[in-house]
Image: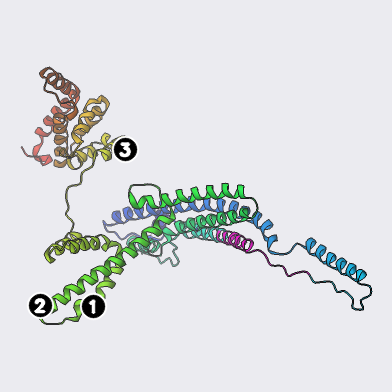
Amino acid sequence: MRTSVPASTYGNKGIAEDGDSGSAFWHLFLRGIDKRQEKLARYNKTAMTSLLTFAGLFAATVAAFLVDGYKSLSPDPNIQAFTTALNHTNALLAQLVQSSSLKPAVAADPAAFHAPRVNVVFNTLWFCALLLSLLCALLATLVLDWMAEPIEIIDLRAPETLEQYALKRLGSFMGIRRYGLDRLSTAVVGLMHLAVIVFLIGLSMFLFTTNSVIFLVVAIGSGLASGFYLLASLAPMLDKDCPYRTPLTYFFLIFLSTFGALILSIIIYIAIVISSIGNWIHDRKIVLRDITLRHLWHVMKRNTALMPLLSHLFKSWFKGESAAERHDIVHRNYHPSRGRTTLSVKELLYVTTYTDLLQNPRTAQYMARRLFDMEREGIAEYIAQLREHRSMVARLVSAFNRVDSPQDAIGSVRLLQMLLLADDPARVTSSHDEVAKREDARWKQLRARLNAACSFARLNARRPFERGLPV
């Protein structure tokens, strides 16, 4: 097992400072690499340790069934001895009955033993399950060893600058992604799941030869579990926010993306050939490079990135749109619009419920400036509900207590504007009395906010040029 060498320790003893102001950047860079690597190693350690425990228990269970099931592949010695003795007895009795015969009776040899085919099948499945569980345990130990310290410093050259060490760490970290070490634990878990499935199939076949009632119970339970596993594997493909994922999910995604890209690229290539032939007829000139197979190979190499583009191009071609419109589709795919990012009501509820972003002045100002869009459905109602909670308004007051830049000031002013103007559409009424009551309640709810806004205005009026704000 390799031991980890912290970047700070190595930096103090083996790395020569480069004397450049970029050292702060490289220290921050190494901290980010260490954090990501530590998170990955911690996940793999937890997953592989749990898998080792399960693999041990599973292998012991399979071995217990194999001890009994393997006997069905060979003849029972007691039965074989009894059959041989019975044959000799029958031969002697026949000789006594036919005492006048000069030809002695010979005992017949017992018939050759042939194990039933179903016994061979379920024993084969159980041996495969045992083999898979042992391989999973072996791979789990290898993953634990590889992820304990994937950055192995073989040759320490002194003095080595911080930049050189950071680049070495970056190369090693990129190697983890390039060689799939970060996804190997998922593959090992998938093999363990396969071992369980193989064992359950063999168990059902074994019980089929023993007791039909127990066989039905086990078969139905195994079928329901398999159905749930399949649904959990397919659910993320229907809803990208679904948290239920299995190793089979990644296999499905790879298969569908590759197979789908192949089918769509073939269709697009056929469309290219048809279009090229039409151009040849129109121009009376054949250009073979228009139908080269490199188009197909280029699509297959980048199937994940081009899958959405191919589907849009196929729809455009099927609708009979012009070449200019298809060119616009390609352009939008490679040059997406950088529109303003906003959050939906559900996302805002999640952010404000499970995080403390509204308690931080900088994040509250940023959310008001960039993420709140009053034109989206439900946002005005959401802000109006925030205004009714006294504790939430008290938290939002902090956004006026710290304004360090013009962007912060814009966020604070926009937040005040939304709190003043936001209204719940469900409570809109034409009654003058109700409107007056709601307006009075609105100002009472925002009393602390308005006091902070006055302080904010006086503070920024004293130093407009220092803070970069307009006078």
Query: What separation in Å lies between label 1 and label 3 (alpha carbons)?
Result: 54 Å
Residue 424 can be seen in this image? no
Circle nearer the N terminus (2, 3)? 2
Residue neighbourhood size for the residue with mark 1, other residues' Cα within 10 Å, grouped as few (<14), some (14–19), many (≥20):
few
Residue 466 can be seen in this image? yes
Q: Position of residue 198 (x, y in %)?
A: 54, 58
| Amino acid beneath label 2 | His
> Which residue, given by chain and number where applicable, does mark 3 sit on?
355
Residue at 89%, 78% (x, y): give it: 103
> Which residue, given by chain and number where applicable, does mark 2 sit on?
282
Q: Position of residue 342 (x, y in %)?
A: 20, 44
Pointers 1 and 3 in contact (C-beta within 8 Å)? no
> Which residue, given by chain and number where applicable, does mark 1 sit on?
292
Which is more foreground, mark 1 or mark 2? 2
Asked whether, in this view, residue 23 is left or right of residue 248, the answer is: left
Q: Decide which of 430, 359 is in the foreground and name it.
A: 430
Q: Is residue 67 magenta?
A: no
